Image: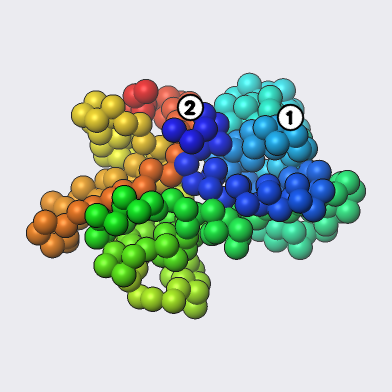
Amino acid sequence: MLHPFISGNKFRKLKYNIAFAKAQQLETLVTFGGAYSNHIAATAAAAKVNGLQAVGIIRGEELGNDLEQTLSENPTLHFAHDQGMKFHFVTRSAYREKEEAATVKALLESLPSPYLIPEGGSNELAVKGCTEILTPADAQYNFVCCSVGTGGTLKGLIAAADAHQHILGFPALKSSYIKDELKDWATHNRWSLINDYHFGGYAKVSKELITFMNTFFADTGILLDPIYTAKLMYGVYDLIEKGYFPENSRILAIHTGGLQGIAGMNMKLAKKGLPIIHT
């Protein structure tokens, strides 16, 4: 509903980052992501729409050995490439170091007017954009639920929530680092992390989750993505069944986009002989 390619929370996260880059006359958006990153795809599209260049620093040096083959096997990178994004493939160790890695530093120094956006797009300007997700009409809800990756969307919702609202974050990763970060950042305690629905970790799925996604789509006509929103909705439904929410609760679940990742996930599932996601 926001944009066909710059979808969900990525639209919110990039909004003020791009406005800042343009105001400072910075010409190249530089960011990080895995080979199937929704953030990479959205940044590539946003750069094109705004007349900017884009460079994606991609985890996995081997993906650059045969770019043509990589693009033929990876719908996400193929789309970003079509949008004009240039790729810089780095080793996993260099990727963990991010902008501190020597190869990344050298890249940034070589680019004209670069503007660095962190992995997942989460920084202060992204949080500012995510505070705009909730509207006055959403005051009717007393629970607001969202999936959690780097935490920027959750921070925006926490900052924007009304006094009667409790924010529930459903991490897609096993790591609990985000909890300590939120404790230091949040100005109130009307939020909780629900850590029971990551399905084994980031980008991990199961037959049970795929079945849930397909049933949800058949029942509602709404597609979920396998990385974030499927786990969020599975968790919300499970908590309802377990009586987590008080009677007469009004629950809002935020769909953060990411549907571009379905094609790549289906390719992986098909290779493993597992059920695929219906679209």
Count neighbours of disc 2 (C-alpha within 10 A) and say few if under 14, some if 14 to 19, many if 20 or more: some
Left or right of 135? Residue 10 is right
Q: For numbered disc 2, what is the local secondary structure?
A: helix
Q: Spatial distance from mark 1 to mark 2, Cα to Cα?
A: 20 Å
**Which residue is painted at 76% across and 38% down in the image?**
52
Q: So how many labels did they put on this image?
A: 2
Q: Position of residue 105 (x, y in %)?
A: 83, 57
Q: Amino acid at mark 2?
A: Ala
Q: Position of residue 155 (x, y in %)?
A: 47, 63
Left or right of 60? Residue 28 is right
**Displayed quadrant of residue 50:** top right
**In-front residue for pair 206/42:** 42
Say which residue label 2 marks.
263
Q: For numbered disc 1, what is the local secondary structure?
A: loop
Count neighbours of disc 1 (C-alpha within 10 A) and say few if under 14, some if 14 to 19, many if 20 or more: some
**Which residue is painted at 54% across and 44% down in the image?**
10
**In-front residue for pair 93/95:** 95
Give the answer, above or below, for where 183 lies relative to 18. below
Asked if residue 85 shows in the view, the reply is no
Q: Nearer the viewer, mark 1 or mark 2?
A: 1
Quarter containing the C terminus:
top left
Q: Which label is found at residue 155?
A: none
Q: Residue lying farthest front?
A: 136
Q: Which label is found at residue 84?
A: 1
Give the answer, above or below, for where 183 lies relative to 94. below
Q: Position of residue 175 (x, y in %)?
A: 46, 63
Give the answer, above or below, for where 277 lies relative to 178. above
Left or right of 149? Residue 243 is left
Q: Position of residue 68 (x, y in %)?
A: 72, 23
Q: Amino acid at mark 1?
A: Gly
Name which of mark 1 and mark 2 comes first in the sequence. Answer: 1
**In-front residue for pair 157/169:** 157
